[in-house]
Image (cartoon, grey):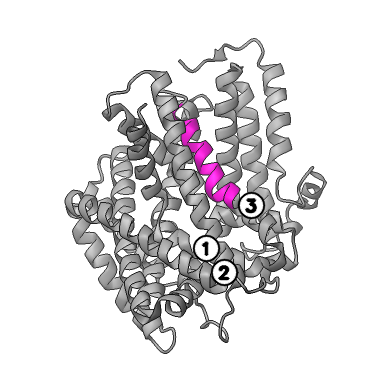
Amino acid sequence: MKLKYVFVVGFMLFAMFFGAGNLIFPPAIGHESGEHFWPGVIGFVLTGVGLPLIAVIAGAISKGGYDESLNHVSKWFSIAFMVAIFLTIGPFFAIPRTATTAYEMSILPYLSDTSTLSLLIFTVLYFLIVFLICLKPGYLVDTIGKSLTPILLITIVLLIIMGILNYSGLTPNETSGAFLEKSAFSVGFTEGYLTMDAIAAIVFSLIVINAIRGLGFSSKKDLLNGTIQSAVLAAVLLGVIYVALAWIGNRVGLPGEIAEGQNLGTFILTFVAEDVLGGFGVFVLATIVFLACLTTCVGLIVSVSEYFHELIPRVSYVAWVSIFVLISLVLANQGLSTIIQGSVPVLMILYPIAMTVVSLVIFTYFVPSPRLALQIPVYTVSIVSILAVIFRSDYFGISALEVLPLQILEYLPLFAAEFEWIPILIVGYIIGYVFGSKQPKIVYE
């Protein structure tokens, strides 16, 4: 694929990943990691950039994308997994997050304190606009979305350059938060889950493949090579921006304490914008972030509504839009920090499963394997991930340890580092390959 086409598709993929909401995580990681900056940020980049890169590439291995690959596990698992992904990057977490991020970046800086009433008024107006646009989304999202991404990128790059120039002589902040309790790499790695990009990449991969086909490339080799080149370009751009924002968060000294319930990342970005660009810089950044969140929200609701309308045709597209807008409105009023906190258990379940699926798709591309070699590790990782989340938190409000002997999970290799899914994947694959040796091998043509 010619270089100009690589840039066309690569920038398109970058624009899909480069949501305004993702900008809030690197500064917070950098600020809390303190002296452990590099292990923390490397872990974050691996899941926030590396996994999405691999997931997009893995989607190009099969002509039918992940739908076809997941069917090798089972049809019901394919549907259940894709539904979970769409709900996660849709009305349960990502869509409400666009509203609360827009509120904290665009409205909150001009208020004396957080207010449930101001958030309610803002989100009602926000989702009313979203609903109206979703009825005929094509023109506005395409035109405004395509123009906003370059402007947002230019603004962020300017903010980064000015931030580096202003804070280059400062020492790292003190280590705080989860970095005081766990290894920096492990914290950064799991914090990268919050971007949701690795699971979003499973959806985006089909868009990339169709875009490359639209450029006139249809052979499997061209599709795979074009996807790899485009994904690498997008990953490099994202990685550079994430590391730079994390570095600024690592060095900037914050005045006083943030408002109760306010997200640390949004507070840092707003403070840095005012500190290095002045009041006008805050206004420009706030306006662009608001519009970027709006178009991202519309794109997500349209995608999720179309998927569920295709899955359940009896329910109209407009009805799905209405349902998801209402769900998102209710959840958005819980506040950004609550949404992020609530997403953690779900993402701690979904990410190991997603990483297992992606790893198996790539590995079986080079080593044709029986169906059982996919089923055993996928099902086992799914079960253990659910039990591990219950064991590690009291999120469910009950003492699960009294019902289930979950302490046995602590004996799993790498459990303390929250990477127990890796040995389970490896052992499960070997067992499945041995016992399924008489089954036909899966071959991606």
* Alpha carbon separation for disc pair 1 and 3: 13 Å
**In the image, residue 132 lies at what x, y percent?**
19, 60
Name the residue: 34% across, 47% down.
Answer: 304
Asked if residue 46 lies in the magenta stretch, the reply is yes
For the residues marked 1 and 2, what is the alpha-carbon distance in whole angstroms? 6 Å
* Secondary structure under the numbered disc 2 in the rendered image: helix
- Tell me the amino acid under the disc marked 1: Leu
From which residue to which does the magenta span run?
Answer: 45-60
Residue 265 makes an appearance in the image: no
Q: Callout 2 environment at 10 Å: few (<14), some (14 to 19), or many (20+)?
A: many
Q: Nearer the viewer, residue 266 or 374?
A: 266
Which kind of residue does numbered mark 2 sit on?
Answer: Gly
Find disc 3 in the rendering and name its residue: 42
Q: Are marks 1 and 2 in contact (CB under 8 Å)?
A: yes
Q: Position of residue 221 (x, y in %)?
A: 43, 19
Residue situated in front as seen by the camera: 358 or 166 = 166
Question: Does 2 sit left or right of 61 as displayed?
Answer: left
Residue, far bottom:
112
Identify the mark at residue 249; answer none if there is no mark: 2
Q: Residue at x 53, y 67 (%)?
A: 164
> From this viewpoint, which residue is outermost toward the right?
411
Name the residue at 71% across, 59% down.
184
Does the rendering let one see residue 258?
Answer: yes
Q: Which residue has dot 1 on it? A: 245
Whether residues under marks 1 and 3 lie with C-beta atoms below 8 angstroms apart, the answer is no
Q: Position of residue 27 (x, y in %)?
A: 54, 66
